[in-house]
Image (cartoon, grey):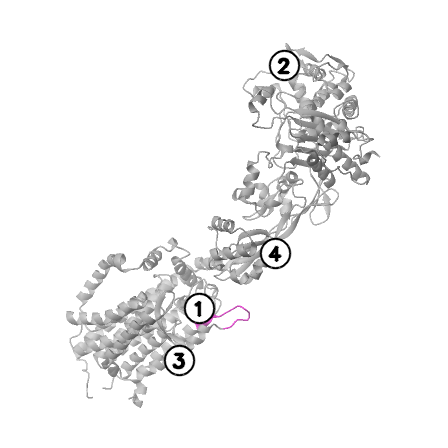
Amino acid sequence: MGSNTPALPPDDRRNLGLRLSGLQAVVATAFAALAVAFWIFQVAQHQRFDDMAENTHRRRLPLPAPRGVLFDRNGKVLVENQNTFNIALVREQSGNIDETLRILAAATGADEAKMRETVNRRRREPSYRPIVLIENASIEQVIAFRARRLELPGIISQEVPARQYPQSEMGAHLFGYVSEASEADLAKPEYAGAESGSMVGKAGVEQSYNKLLMGKDGDRLVVVNSRGREMGEASHNNPVEGRRVQLTIDGDVQRATEEGFEHFGYNGAAVILDPRSGEVLAFTSLPAYNPNQFAGGIDVADWNSLLTNDLKPLQNRALQGRYSPGSTFKIAVATAALEEGLVTPDFRVFCPGGATFYGRYFQCHLKGGHGSVDMRHAIEKSCNVYFYTLGKMLEVDRIHKWATLLGLGERSGIDLPGELKGLVPSTEWKKTTREPKWYPGETISVSIGQGQVSVTPISLAVMMMTIANGGTRYTPHVVKAVDEGRGWEPVPAPPPQSIVKMKQSTIDALHDGLWMVVNAAGTGGRARILNYNVAGKTGTAQVISLEGAKVAKGKMDVRDHGWFVFFAPADKPEIAGVIFAEHAEHGYLGAPIAKYAMETYFARKEGRPLPTLPPKTGAPVIVADAAAAPASPTAAVQR
Amino acid sequence: MFERRLFFHVDWLLLVAILVLMGIGVTMIYSTTYVHLPEPGHPGPQFRTQIYAIALGLIALLVCLAVDYRKLAESSLVIYGGLTVLLIYVLFQGSTQYNATRWIDVGPFNLQPSEFGRVTVALVLAMFFGENRRGARNPGDLATAGVFAAVPFFLIAKQPDLGTAVTLIPVCFGIAYLAGLRMKLIAILAIAAILMAPIAWKFALKDYQKTRITTFINPELDPQGDGYQQRQARITVGSGGLTGKGFMKGTQGQYKFLPVAHNDFIFSVLAEEKGFLGVLVALGLYLFVILRSVEAARLSKDRIGAYLVGGIISGFAFQVIYNITMSAGLAPVKGLTLPLMSYGGSSMIATLAGFGLILNVRMRRFTN
């Protein structure tokens, strides 16, 4: 045992041994601690971490359900779905987002700054959730993107069913629009079943029948890796398409009504009903918006321009606009006087061009006066003095009672959202205002539809329906049948709002008078259709008083609105409604729109070719005059 | 040089334990680097590389076993000089990956010289304290030893690779402790370290190093960034449960939620797929390897052997304990591999060379 290194002396060896044991003890203690730590994580808290692991690698991807298709009463498609392409960014798969957006913009021609803003706005969302950059991408854009796919990591194209309104703005306020449910929406009962990201109806039929139309979104549970790449599918639930719904709307009458407004150059509203049931044949409010803009998410600029537009395209004038009814209100006053038995249709009043009531002189619109008129002629000529007299006899509360029975100052109960009430004053109502006493003089103004009275267009349509059918105030409704998967099943009509059995003499007098408005010496000649006995009444809604007009001059449109209310045929009515022509100044200017709608209705019913409007040549007045003449070439119905 | 009778003194039990640990490591690397798509998939390139590394490492082990450790200790200064040259070379000519310059490009593979720092420093210090006959009681000697350790420490920290540099500390400390470092001094050093911590925080640590520590203390500060790995590590380990999700069935590792799982977090993958029972087996094997190696120091014929073993096994134990703590999300994330199991050629070769020396000391306990 020669040695070049010294062996350990026993003392040193003992010391070394102690220190080695110390080292072993430290290591053993550390390992024991580690074993305890792993036991805590893996055994004691296993469940919690297992749940976290599940959440980490499983993703629920929604499969949006197509909404139910809307048909018109004749089976024509009104609103459908179309698959569109979105180009979207999945941030967690994209390396350099700025660079990616730049290349994408160059390839597709999309606005780079706008895309960047979109990404920025949604940067707080989980990074695996796609952010849609280009909605409703064109085929060219999709091809351009696919060609450069390798340079565009994280960019995907997705096919999604989007709501499609083939007629764009036609019936926009009737159909409404769809958009993504907001957090606040999810709490509302009408959106039960919707989830964050679901598309829900936000107006019109889309909203009120959302539950039927929405269907049920499906989903896929997929297994993904840390880069969001799909590794497999854990489960798959197919979406259930929304119910098909048939509306009471007649697509042709709807189109004719809107064409009429366009042709004669007015905004406004129209509601056309079947007076035998309350079914809505046409419903419009103009100007409208294009609901297709909302289908894939409207952009901020478009939305702001809709909100700030002076013409208020988002307002549903038919349900929410409240205007003075003007002379159309005389129909309600006449009904009240006849039904209360205060007068008979032969009751005569002498009109010298005005009269004094309660110490104040009230004018008739005809300076020279109408002479002696009975009920029929008073309606035909719209004689103010006659109705002042009836108003004085009735007093305000009886006017209120009958106006209400005809639907004025009430909600019609139509199955569309957002309806407002007009106002028909009464002494009861007056008590709720600041000056609680009703002055009899106020009744005189009310009896010709001025003063405090205000109505919505749809409530005037209801009035005409009720007069036409002799006292049944049906509830207007737009849904005729629903296909719940077992074929079309008719939806029962809602119960009428009120039923009064009007006297035959009342009905005859009103129908005669209103027929004379159109077919004799009245103001509704422009709605005349030979052999179809159109009955109607015009009215003028003052926008502002004469004094107010001076103040407001130049700041707003102060021209009066025109009303035309109608039904036909007078002896056996099957169509009734209202045309509200905004700032038309005269009620008779709305009459040709009604005429065109009615012509279309009758032509469609009798299987004749549908009428067309002549090309717009210049001033709408000329066309309107021609339409009023019996020999008009536009009136195809007159053969 | 290698006498036949020495063959019978080889510690076969220790060698088998090492081989089993490497086998577990390779299995886990196979699982976590397996390429699933496109179907049907194939093993990742790391699996094969690791097998080659183990083969090279076993050769290194044989070399370190065959040459008498005393001979090696005598030439330790030469080895030390060579390492220093390589570390300096790395700083100027090394290849850069992940913002750090740690590698020398040697044809088919990259060599990471810093991994050999521990073995080299252990050799030099074992020689130094073993030869001076005074042990580690003289302040002058301690200072000299400190300088020996400090040179590679700063060269490695400069790469920057603080994690690997720090592993030199337990090596020095282990040797000094065995060489009789006074317990009083150990206590003073411990207190000084605690007092120095705020100063080091302020002046010595880089921002990213500070972030690692702050996010360790509160991972929610940055759940997607630095806290992410730690959070994922805990989920990986915790979701493994008692028996694990099964081989290649771990979702965290397979779907790459746990970054560099085959490298720093191989133990997390083991915990996920083999569960707490697998963890106990691996912990038991590591503990056995360490305690058994310490026995080699106890049996050593001379001081040099005891100190050499003590230094190498202290560095090894430190690295194992730190990495496993980190793999459960209980320590700040550092680029510190798990010896014998983690993917990495240089680490594997250096570790096996170290065990070659440990086996060497035990095997030659009866020779001169």
Is B29 one of the magenta-colored residues?
Answer: yes
Q: Is residue A43 visible?
A: no
- Decide which of B217, A364 is in the foreground and name it: A364
Q: Which residue is mark 1?
A: B274
Q: How many angstroms separate mark 3 from mark 4 (CA)? A: 57 Å
**Label 4 vs 2, first from the N-terminus:** 4
The answer to whether marks 1 and 2 mark residues whose Cβ atoms lie closer than 8 Å is no
- Decide which of A402, A153 is in the foreground and name it: A153
The label nearer to you, 4 versus 2, is: 4
* Region of the chain picked out in magenta, as a range: B27-42
Q: How many angstroms separate mark 3 from mark 1 (CA)? A: 26 Å
Q: How many angstroms separate mark 4 from mark 2 (CA)? A: 70 Å
Q: How many angstroms separate mark 4 from mark 1 (CA)? A: 52 Å
Q: Which residue is mark 2?
A: A441
Is A186 one of the magenta-colored residues?
Answer: no
Q: Which residue is mark 4?
A: A140
The answer to whether marks 3 and 4 mark residues whose Cβ atoms lie closer than 8 Å is no
- State the image coordinates of residue B186 (x, y, percent, origin top left): 20, 66
Asked whether, in this view, residue B137 is left or right of residue B64, the answer is: left
Q: Amino acid at mark 4?
A: Glu
Q: Is residue A243 positioned above or below B236 on the image?
A: above
